[in-house]
Amino acid sequence: MKINLCPNCSSDNYVKSGIVNNRQRYKCKACNYFFTVNKLGKKIDDYYVNKALQLYLEGLTYREIERILGISHVSIMNWVKKYNIKRPYNSTYHPTYKILNSEELSKFFSDASNLSGAGTLVTELGDKFMLIKWERFRE
């Protein structure tokens, strides 16, 4: 990572000053502040961010999304806050989901009883497909 300015005084007048924990250390000549290059964090692919937000909007909980995608539920909560996602609240329907491969998906849709009585969404999930079905709460 390239250093442009001192994080303390924003001066561009700095020199190399050794290595600490296998990271280059710098010294600012203006304020005598020592600093190192910031660590690069682990970046999660945008595909998974979009998929997690989509599943959240479809009504799945954070922990359900965590189990499906293998991404921390805390990360998903942070993305929901960051992008200001608001889920519409409707208590009369709840989603159920299944993860199917292409053969199982075609078999599911060949049965006519699976096509009536509820809304259905199919989304790609890596090499498999996720089928989300909304059903009314039973009273």
Image (cartoon, rainbow, N blue to C red):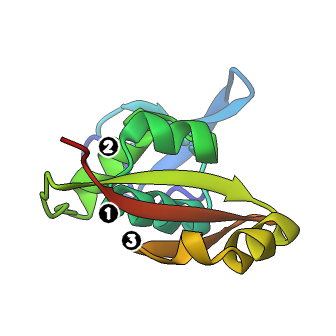
Q: Of the numbered discs in the image, which one, if any, rests on residue 98?
A: none
Residue 15 sits above or below residue 107 on the image: above
Task: Give SS at disc 2.
Answer: helix
Q: Which residue is mark 3?
A: 117
Q: Which residue is mark 2?
A: 77
Task: Give SS at disc 1.
Answer: helix
Could you say where residue 41 lies in the image, as x and y percent from the top left?
56, 43
Could you say where residue 112 lies in the image, as x and y percent from the top left?
62, 78
Residue 77 sits above or below residue 18 on the image: below
Mark found first going from the N terminus, 3 or 2: 2
Front label number (1 vs 3)? 3
Q: Of the numbered discs in the image, which one, if any, rests on residue 57?
A: 1
Give the class, few, some or many, for how many residues have Cα within 10 Å of label 1's Cα (few <14, many ≥20). Answer: some
Q: Which residue is situated farthest in the right direction here?
A: 103
Residue at 69%, 73% (x, y): give it.
111
Q: Which residue is situated farthest in the top direction here?
A: 21
Front label number (3 vs 2)? 3
Residue at 48%, 68% (x, y): give it.
50
Q: Which amino acid, by three-letter code, is at mark 3? A: Gly
